Amino acid sequence: MTRTRANYKIPRGMGRGLVIRDMQQAPLGSSAPMFSRPLIARSEWGDRIAEKKKHRAMLSDIRNISGPNGGMIPALNQGRDPWCWAFSPTSAATLARASAGSPYKHLSGNAVGNMVTGFKVRGGWSENSMKFVQEKGVPETSYWPEGDNKRHWDSPDTWANAAENVVLEWWDIDPNDKDAIMTCLLLNYPVAVDIPAWGHSVCLIDPVDAAGKEFDQFNSWGNNWNGNGIGRLKGKYTKFSSAIACTAVTGG
């Protein structure tokens, strides 16, 4: 098994686009309920991580067998567009579907980014995108191709397809609340996080250590980045400006 590396270099030809969440405009709990489930005690974190690794029950393990033909779910690829904040919730929705045993669908982060911005290529934060996906859903790339920003994809057929992929439940999390973030990951709920030190938004996929100081993340720079699209976060890159957990998506 390849060891996951921390890698914060920005590949040539890849975008980021994070804007720090405006807590005046979008205060915690304004778009979704705050995380309120019972916390998993810190004393249990190490054993739970070990148990999940033993049984290959981490989100990364589920990702490895839930893609096309029972293979790996491909990492999304935002390309040059500054829409990491649209792709991280889309990745979270993809993983939440896989965790629930729903069939694989390649969902379109470009659809979310274009619709949230009104086809303006600019930055944003993940909470705004998740709110959109809850209201309208996210279409498959067969209806709005990845990397394509043309307006003609904004059609009734596209949004009829998107309605099949609606986030039914998500939680807003205090970005400083590592206990809530760890609890979500240990329950296999993917968490989209915004990282000011990187200017980037990604989807947390696995807890790494029993202290909650390191996480593995599912990026949106394609499978060729770092090691099948997954990298490690540590140090200042685990200080988040927004964190949202996706817990239920329509299946089918």
Image (cartoon, rainbow, N blue to C red):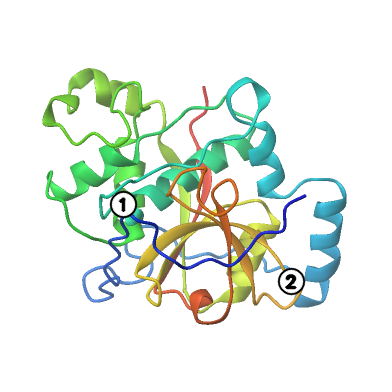
Q: Give the residue drawn at x 19%, y 20%.
A: 156
Determine whether the residue tagged by mark 2 lies in a helix, strand or loop.
loop
Mark 2: give few (<14), some (14-19) or many (20+) Cα within 10 Å.
Answer: few
Name which residue type carries label 1. Answer: Gly
Q: Give the residue drawn at x 59%, y 29%.
A: 67
- Mark 2 in CB contact with mark 1 (< 8 angstroms): no
Q: Give the residue drawn at x 36%, y 27%.
A: 141
Q: Position of residue 246 (x, y in %)?
A: 50, 50
Q: Is residue 100 above or below residue 246?
A: above
Give the alpha-carbon distance from disc 2 to disc 1, as whole Å. Answer: 32 Å
Q: Give the residue drawn at x 47%, y 74%.
A: 175
Q: Which mark is residue 209?
A: 2
Q: Position of residue 234 (x, y in %)?
A: 59, 75
Q: Residue 99, located in which quarter of the rendered image?
A: top right
Q: Which mark is residue 179?
A: none
**In this image, 109 relative to 187: left or right?**
left
Q: Position of residue 238 (x, y in %)?
A: 53, 75
Q: Which mark is residue 13?
A: 1
The residue sitting at the front extreme is: 12
Q: Nearer the viewer, mark 2 or mark 1?
A: 1
